[in-house]
Image: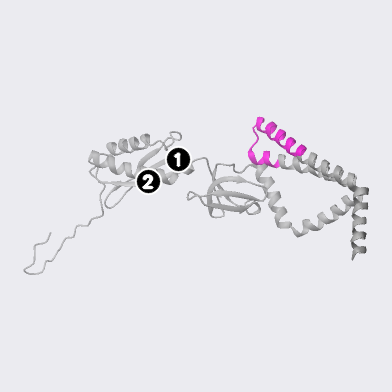
């Protein structure tokens, strides 16, 4: 037992004597490389921000810069140990080919992500509809695109499911289509002006494009008024509730009637002894 311990002790001491300084040098190189990669990443981020490039492109370029710098640092650290770099690079190439075949789905997501970043079919902050899912674009990454719903939930879509498919981009605003019915004897000009007052007093309603108000149809019991107004995606649901409430309040103040369905029944042959036909 003592002999074995002495053998291990001698082996460790011999290893530290022979490679101790190389290990210290390699650790220092890796630490310096990590700091250099971080510094160059921040420098690149600041430079790209001044040129007003979009966030996904800035993030991609910064990550590539950091990865390249740190990879060169690892090569230098391995060289301190006398590792032959050329066979290592060849081995990495062969392994990379095998990994690429095994990760075709992930790589297709990466290429699709690059396509989205550079072709810009949509941008962060815009409201889009993809594969039956809709939401505001929260982030565009290499592998996935993240949408946020109005209920604050998140939808993560693989980028390869986006490229080549039909995409509906609403942009940074959504059209709210409201409808309200008024009685046939209502003053239509008063109805229109009242609705315009409601829209103008709502701070969420956009002034450009100008809201559209008009008669959409003549129903059995009411004149149906169509209201088209534009809002930012986060305000879409709340604005609908606010406008409907404000319309009811203003209509009541001005005596504008919102009719309910009703039917007049005429009895052509009233039973004997019954009431007269109405």
Mark 1 neighbour density, 10 Å: few (under 14) some (14–19) many (20 or more): many
In percent of width and height, residue 38 lies at: 73, 38
In percent of width and height, residue 236 lies at: 44, 44
Residue drawn where x is 74% and y is 42% of the image: 64
Mark 2 neighbour density, 10 Å: few (under 14) some (14–19) many (20 or more): few
In percent of width and height, residue 262 lies at: 23, 55
Residue that extends furthest to the front in the rendered view of this protein: 2
**Residue matched to label 2:** 241
Of the numbered discs 2 and 1, the one sitting upstream in the chain is 1
In this rendered view, identify the residue nearer to me: 67 or 211: 67
Instruction: Let me know if residue 36 is in the magenta part.
Output: yes
Dominant secondary-structure state across the stretch colored magenta: helix
Q: CB under 8 Å between callouts 2 and 1?
A: no
Quadrant that contains the N terminus: bottom right
Residue drawn where x is 89% and y is 47% of the image: 20
**Residue matched to label 1:** 231
Does residue 211 sit above or below 160 in this rendering?
Answer: above
- Magenta-highlighted residues: 35-60
In percent of width and height, residue 176 lies at: 43, 44
Say left or right for 263 vs 230: left
Residue that extends furthest to the top in the rendered view of this protein: 50
């Amino acid at each position: 037992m003592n002999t074995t311990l002495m053998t291990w002790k001698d082996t460790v001491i011999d290893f530290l004597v022979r490679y101790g300084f190389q290990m210290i040098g390699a650790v220092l190189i890796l630490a310096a490389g990590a700091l250099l990669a971080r510094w160059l990443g921040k420098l690149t981020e600041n430079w790209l921000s001044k040129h007003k490039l979009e966030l996904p492109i800035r993030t991609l370029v910064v990550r590539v810069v950091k990865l390249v710098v740190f990879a060169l640092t690892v090569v230098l650290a391995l060289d301190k140990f006398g590792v032959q770099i050329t066979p290592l690079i060849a081995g990495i190439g062969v392994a990379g080919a095998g990994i690429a075949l095994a990760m075709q789905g992930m790589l297709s997501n990466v290429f699709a992500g690059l396509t989205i970043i550079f072709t810009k079919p949509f941008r962060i902050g815009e409201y889009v509809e993809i594969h039956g899912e809709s939401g505001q674009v929260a982030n565009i990454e290499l592998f996935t695109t993240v949408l946020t719903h109005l209920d604050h939930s998140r939808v993560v879509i693989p980028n390869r499911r986006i490229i080549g498919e039909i995409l509906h981009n609403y942009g940074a605003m959504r059209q709210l289509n409201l409808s309200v019915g008024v009685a046939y004897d209502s003053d239509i000009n008063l109805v229109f002006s009242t609705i315009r007052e409601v829209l103008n007093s709502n701070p969420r309603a956009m002034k450009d494009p100008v809201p559209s108000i008009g008669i959409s149809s003549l129903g059995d019991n009411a004149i149906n008024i169509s209201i088209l107004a534009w809002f930012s995606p986060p305000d879409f649901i709340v604005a609908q509730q606010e406008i409907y409430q404000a319309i009811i309040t203003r209509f009541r103040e001005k005596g504008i009637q919102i009719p309910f369905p009703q039917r007049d029944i005429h009895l052509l042959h009233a039973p004997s002894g019954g009431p007269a036909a109405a």
